[in-house]
Image (cartoon, rainbow, N blue to C red):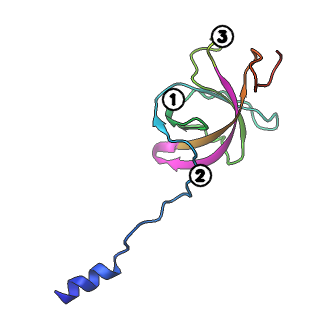
Amino acid sequence: MESSSREDESMPETTEPQYAEKRRYRRAKIAKPLRVRPSDPRDEHFEDLPVSINASKEGIYFHTRRPNYYKGMRLFVTFPFASAHDPMNCEYVAEVVRVESLPNGRFGIAVHLKLTVNYGGAPGSIGPS
């Protein structure tokens, strides 16, 4: 009996999270298409059309096969995305905050939505009014 209680003492009571929690808003599991493009002209141009895994008011997490992403990369993100000419598209300036290597040559990308780019001239947006 005593040996089993000693084993219990050596077991950690809690586990530490892999990443420090920085989110201010809860994430919702939501599978919606998005369009992602680099905003910095120094980055190689691409257009990625992944589907979100989850999203919050200030961020989106998605999977991709593109190896182009890096932490700190600035992007234009349209979420949700139906077509290039859909007036309901909402485009954001975003920054990659995490890149995870996943099985089968895929990557998990977490982006922080920094600014809404709304060409309709809504208050708080950028673009012509």
Q: Main secondary structure of the magenta part?
A: strand
- Is residue 93 rendered magenta in the image? yes
- Rounded to the nearest whole Å, what is the CA distance between mark 2 and mark 1? 23 Å
Q: Which residue is mark 1?
A: 51
Near mark 2 (Cα within 10 A), the count class, few <14, some 14-19 or many ≥20, is few
Residue at 28% x, 79% y: name it.
8
Left/right of residue 31 with respect to residue 35 in the rendered view: left
Q: Which residue of the protein is positioned furthest toward the bottom in this rendering?
A: 2
- For marks 2 and 3, the one nearer the N-term is 2
**Location of residue 64 by image quarter:** top right
Secondary structure category for the residue under label 1? loop
Q: CA distance from mark 3 to mark 1?
A: 19 Å
**How far across and down, in percent of the image, does residue 84 sit?**
65, 14
Relative image position of residue 116 (x, y in whole percent) = 71, 28
- Segment tinted magenta in the rendering: 90-106
Q: For the residues carrying marks 2 and 1, which lies nearer the camera in this image?
A: 2
Using a 10 Å C-alpha cutoff, classify the residue at mark 3 as few (fewer than 14 neighbours), some (14 to 19) or many (20 or more): few
Q: Nearer the viewer, mark 2 or mark 3?
A: 2
- The numbered mark at residue 111 is none
Which three-letter amino acid code belongs to the residue tagged 3? His
In this view, the residue in front, 66 or 61, is 61
Marked residue nearer the N-terminal end (3 or 1): 1
Residue type for callout 1: Val
**Quadrant in which residue 127 is drawn:** top right
Label disc, if present, on residue 22 of the rendered structure: 2
Q: Alpha-carbon neighbours of circle 1 within 10 Å: few (<14), some, or many (≥20)? A: many
Q: Position of residue 44 (x, y in %)?
A: 75, 35
Q: List the residue tagged with mark 3.
A: 85
In space, the residues marked 2 and 3 are separated at their CA atoms by 34 Å
Residue placed at 76% from the left, 32% from the top? 39
